[in-house]
Amino acid sequence: MKRVKAIYPGSFDPPTNGHLDLIQRGSQIFDELVVAILGNPEKEPLFSVPDRRKMLEVMTADFDNVTVDTFDGLTVDYAIRVGAGALLRGIRAISDYEYELQMALMNRKLQPGLETIFMMPAEKYSYLSSRLVREIAKHGGAIDCLVPPLVAQKLREKMDIAHKFADSAAANSQAKSTTARKTKRKRKS
Ligand code: PNS
């Protein structure tokens, strides 16, 4: 019988409950599923690739046919390198469809033997995205129901560091302007 290995490529910055839902569904229909983190995105990520890899490894530890890997360059080249015959992507709403269709057709043009399979996450995750999670975390909103516990903890740690950094930068600039005012006054007197 033919065994099907699939890759599930993405940014996973950070991984969410929606990603986990899709991984679980994918693990049921493919013999092997590789969650593949893109290492060279155009935008600056919140989490480093090793951080994202660690989070995904913990999240997928209970699935014995799921592994986590990272890649650079074209997804289709990576798929061929690891011997995958299918590429898994999630579609949450119609708004995802246009971009996903374009990407699937381009990937098919580049590598006709690689099939893109779309799966839908549970409805309760249809509004969930990594971008929204980052935004909510940044403003101190509740993230526990949106991401696995380890991801929530890592997000809080990131935001604490960012806040401490912002506080110390603000304190530094306040100190600088106080010194500048004092110097100005001294010069005048
Ligand atoms: O989680 P994302 O950001 O929606 O994932 C997008 C991803 C990583 C699947 C896509 O950007 C991608 O495949 N990038 C690798 C470069 C590539 O192959 N580009 C051509 C796509 S047609």
Image (cartoon, rainbow, N blue to C red):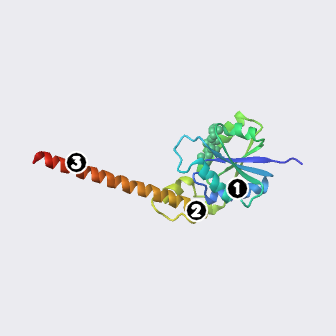
Picture coordinates of residue 174, whole percent (x, y):
29, 53
Given residues 27 and 115, the one toward you in this image is: 27
Q: Residue furthest right?
A: 1
x 19%, y 51%: residue: 182
Instruction: Name the front one of labels 3 and 2.
Output: 3
Where disc 3 sits, the SS reads helix
Q: Earlier in the sequence, mark 2 or mark 1?
A: 1
Of pointers 1 and 3, the one earlier in the residue sequence: 1
Point 19% across, 47% down: residue:
183
What is the crowding at mark 3: few (fewer than 14 residues within 10 Å), some, or many (at least 20)?
few
Of residues 98 and 5, the one nearer the viewer is 5
Measured along the vertical axis of the image, is residue 117 above or below residue 156? above
The spot of residue 52 in percent (x, y) is 61, 52
At label 3, which amino acid type do we have? Answer: Ala
- On screen, 27 above or below 100? below
In this rendering, the count of numbered labels is 3
How far apart are the alpha carbons under marks 1 and 3? 57 Å
Give the residue at mark 1. Answer: 23
Label 2 – label 1 distance at C-alpha:
15 Å
- Disc 3 versus disc 2: distance between alpha carbons? 46 Å
Q: Which residue is mark 2?
A: 146
Amino acid type of the residue that numbered disc 1 sits on in the rendered structure: Ile
* Residue at 58% over, 50% down: 95
Crowd tier of the residue under label 1, counting other residues whose Cα lies within 10 Å: few below 14, some 14–19, many 20 or above: many
